[in-house]
Image (cartoon, grey):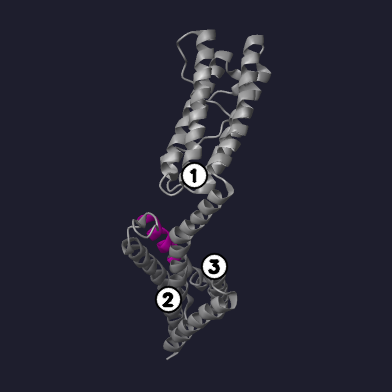
Amino acid sequence: MRNFSDLTEREILALAIANEEEDGRIYVDIAEGLRGEYPGSAQMFTDMAAEEGDHRRRLLDLYREKYGEHIPLVRRQDVRGFIHHKPVWQIQPLQLDAVRDLAESMEVETQQFYRRAAARSEDVSIRKLLGDLAEAEVRHEHMAEGIREKNLPEGVRADEDEHAKRSFILRVIQPGLAGLMDGSVSTLAPVFAAAFATGRSWDAFLIGLAASVGAGISMGFAEALSDNGSLTGRGAPWIRGLICGLMTTAGGIGHTLPFLIPSFLTAVIVAGVVVVVELAAISWIRWKYMDTPPISAALQVAFGGALVFATGVLIGSS
């Protein structure tokens, strides 16, 4: 990679052309990714891509006038200091707030690039050219705000934000919560039954580890195979399955790890505290995202956890 200060003015202009081309492609890809669920935001990014195309044509005309037809290949990943933007196909599924933030960061980065380039230019005509481009980017930023206001009036943006929230709950929170509840609650009985039956921490740890990993695999496949998301809007099945499986395993591992403590009594006490924390976390998630009254959520989760815990202790002590 080269330092920005080492670029010639010709290379800076070539880099500007490449940047405008890449930014336009990114906006088009985002628009296509959002069009099905967020048509207002999709149109906003389509209009922004058209603006980038206009800037590119102006840059090409200015470059041809100054340096001729050949444009050296200079890309932002070849220059230190530029932010590396992942291709849109690598960040699927698209999150509405994430792509809006991405667009804002791209605008700011481009504006700073032109200002730095203009500041270090020693050629009067090139300095003027780069200064004009910096001003064009400032106008572009204001233009982008106007595009947002045209395509995303308050009501449309609120509707899209609400839809994004519902999608996040369906695609992430629900499978994650189902896994966390299953892992935290269903593994209580085998872990504590093994602990009280053997009186040895290591045996309880092995049983808990096997139960947690096995439950994670089972829940992951069950979630992934439950539906393909085409009718329910719950997104890609393999993503939901992965989320559910990992959270199931995490829920069981939480109160299994304390049994690595050699002292049996200490391990049981610590595991009990971890169980309380897990149940509290489940109650909070249900209240925060599932609109469950906090007292009701706490009582329901605590009652179910207590029953499973008691079952494990009674069976292990018999």
Query: Which residue is tagged 1?
Result: 40
Q: Secondary structure at mark 1?
A: helix
The numbered dot on residue 186 is: 2
Which one is in front in this view, the residue at disc 2 or the one at disc 1?
A: 1
Q: Earlier in the sequence, mark 2 or mark 1?
A: 1
Residue 189 position within the rendered picture, expressed as x and y whole percent measured from the top left: 43, 80
Residue type pointed to by label 1: Gly
73 or 2: nearer the viewer: 73
The numbered dot on residue 285 is: 3
In the rendered image, is residue 105 in sight? Answer: no
Residue 304 position within the rendered picture, expressed as x and y whole percent measured from the top left: 48, 81
Residue density around tag 1, few if under 14, some if 14–19, many if 20 or more, within 10 Å: many
225 or 24: nearer the viewer: 24
Which one is in front in this view, the residue at disc 3 or the one at disc 1?
A: 1
Give the residues drawn in magenta, as a range. 238-248
Residue type pointed to by label 3: Ile
Q: Does 162 lie within the magenta span?
A: no
